[in-house]
Image: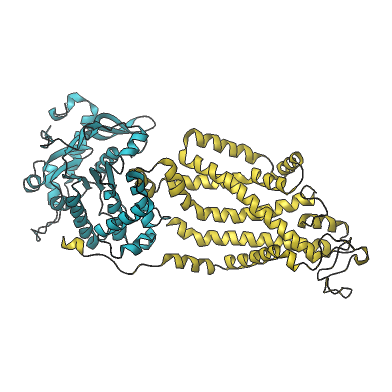
Amino acid sequence: MAEAAAVPGGPLPHARESAVRRLLGNPRVVLGGAVLLFFALAAVFAPLLAPHDPVEQDLMLQYIPPAWSDRAEPGYLFGTDNLGRDILSRLLYGAQIALFVAVAAAAAAGLLGTVLGLLAGYLGGWVDAVISRLVEVWMAFPAVLLSIVLVAVMGTGLHSVIIAIAVIDWTRFCRVVRAETMAQKQQDYVASAVTVGLGRMHILWREILPNVLPLLIVLFTLEMGIAVIVEAILSYVNLSLASDFPTWGTMIADGRKYVNQAPWLMILPILCVIALVLALNALGDGLKDALDPVMRK
Amino acid sequence: MTAPQITPGTPPDGPILSVRNLHLAIAGRRRRTPILRNVSLDIAPGEVHGLVGESGAGKTMIGKVILGIQPSRAVVTGGSVRFGGRDITHLPERERRRLMGRGLGLIPQDPMTSLNPAGRIGGQIADVLRLHLGMDRAAARARALELLNDVHIREPERVLRRYPHELSGGMRQRVLIAIAFACRPKLIVADEPTTALDVTVQRQVLALIKEMQAQDGASILFVTHDLGVVAKTCDRVTVLHGGRVLEAGDTRAIVEAPQHDYTKALMAATPRHDRPGDLLQPVPEALTARLNEEALAYDAGPDTTSASHA
């Protein structure tokens, strides 16, 4: 047994470190992540950062232009709106709502879609047939219309917006997760798990799910971007929170009426939506590229 | 027909595995394509049994049928697989699962893809121990450490925490061998366990499998295309071509005096360290053609086949 005693060893490569390095080496991940972090910090610390109460009205201070204008007032960096409310404070609190909705809605859609996608992809047969047909029927509905109907039925409010997004967008997760599960199911490690007697549910949740996880991270990030837009649309048409509450969509809708006198009322929240959604999309795409070699391993 | 009479011969104390007249076909859209034709083989407790044949001979499929992991389109059309006296040809999933790992094990062909890329080595070994032996987390970890020691992995504590992609192919195969032996199954199917490895590592892994087998006493069905490996590793051997058993018997007898033309041709095609100067001969095409014809004739009907299949 001399040969068996001669142990192969050698240095163990540190592939996990290189995965982190690959993430940090991707400009889209870094840039998107930085912008997202900026908005996240703004949202979390909104109560500390906001110079004014976001809903406090002061009719003496209407239409103050942003700081870069000559008629600006000190203490109102982005100016005030038609009711004299501080735009910066409203944007900060708006970020809170936008990100909360984005995370909650993406999580809910992801949970529903992932569970159904895993079951469809792994079990196949009639389970797959039923879930896949459901997805196809679901995707035939126009998303925006469906969300408006859902919110109209459930009543306005944040929870309705979150539920509406989850109920509509779970199909995105479901389709992708199903396909990936089917691919993973063919891998040798699944056959090995079968040959040591592990049960089907153990294999699905403990063996396959961790391998689908990188994909879920990417989908989750992209879904957050979609949720930000849907929330803005719904609050633009006044189906989200009560209108005095500062969501970006409400601010855009309000600002539209005064776009001739005070264009910044509309432009600033639009810029926020664009920046956040672009950041999330860039981050999602970057993660997809950076995680791909890991997923294919 | 020239096919010789094949008598697998019952080993002294009753076989642990007994494959009898196994027929298997791949179900196509219109017809079934036969893959295994009347295959019989017996493995005694503690025996290392070689299953030799070229690509497409059906040797891997036999291993899969024994383990119950054949593709769903592969249909057993006749015969039986008995394990420990019990017919396991068509076992319900629940009972099959109870058998896997504890009764039957697998050393897979490709160590690079057979470990879960998203799980630590320690966890993957511990999962099996906890499942079958009901160990708690700590006991399973301790046993996993012992197993890694048994398969001669250096710094086992560190390797327990590693992910598969951080290990070399040889180390991964050692881990898979550890997993295969973890719950002391009675029979392990080793499906070309060294084919995907570096030549230098092949010998070490082969020696390791023999060493583990000697300690543990498990039987091994050793699937390979390499008669040289069989000569070094196996007690008995079955030669397969076109899904048919051509010759079976003690390894020494077959290596020293092969009876069937195909076995002789395989011997001539195998590098031998005891005769380093010999030129290797490819298996003659005429022989392959004749064997394929025999297989087709066998499929055509019982009246045209030789007595050995009756």
Residue drawn where x is 20% and y is 63% of the image: A5
Query: Furthest-top residue in view?
Result: B303
Residue drawn where x is 51% and y is 37% of the image: A128
Q: Is residue A219 above or below residue B293?
A: below
Chain identifier matching the cyan colour in the rendered picture: B
Classify the position of the N terminus of chain B by image quarter. top left
Residue A242 locus on image (x, y percent)? 81, 50
* Number of callouts: 0
Residue A197 locus on image (x, y percent)? 35, 42
Chain identifier matching the yellow colour in the rendered picture: A
In the picture, measured across the screen, residue B230 lies left or right of residue B63, that is left
> Which of these two is toward me, B65 or A17?
A17
Q: How is the image coloured?
A: by chain
Residue B77 locus on image (x, y percent)? 29, 29
Q: Is residue B260 above or below residue A297?
A: above
In the picture, measured across the screen, residue A132 lies left or right of residue B282, that is right
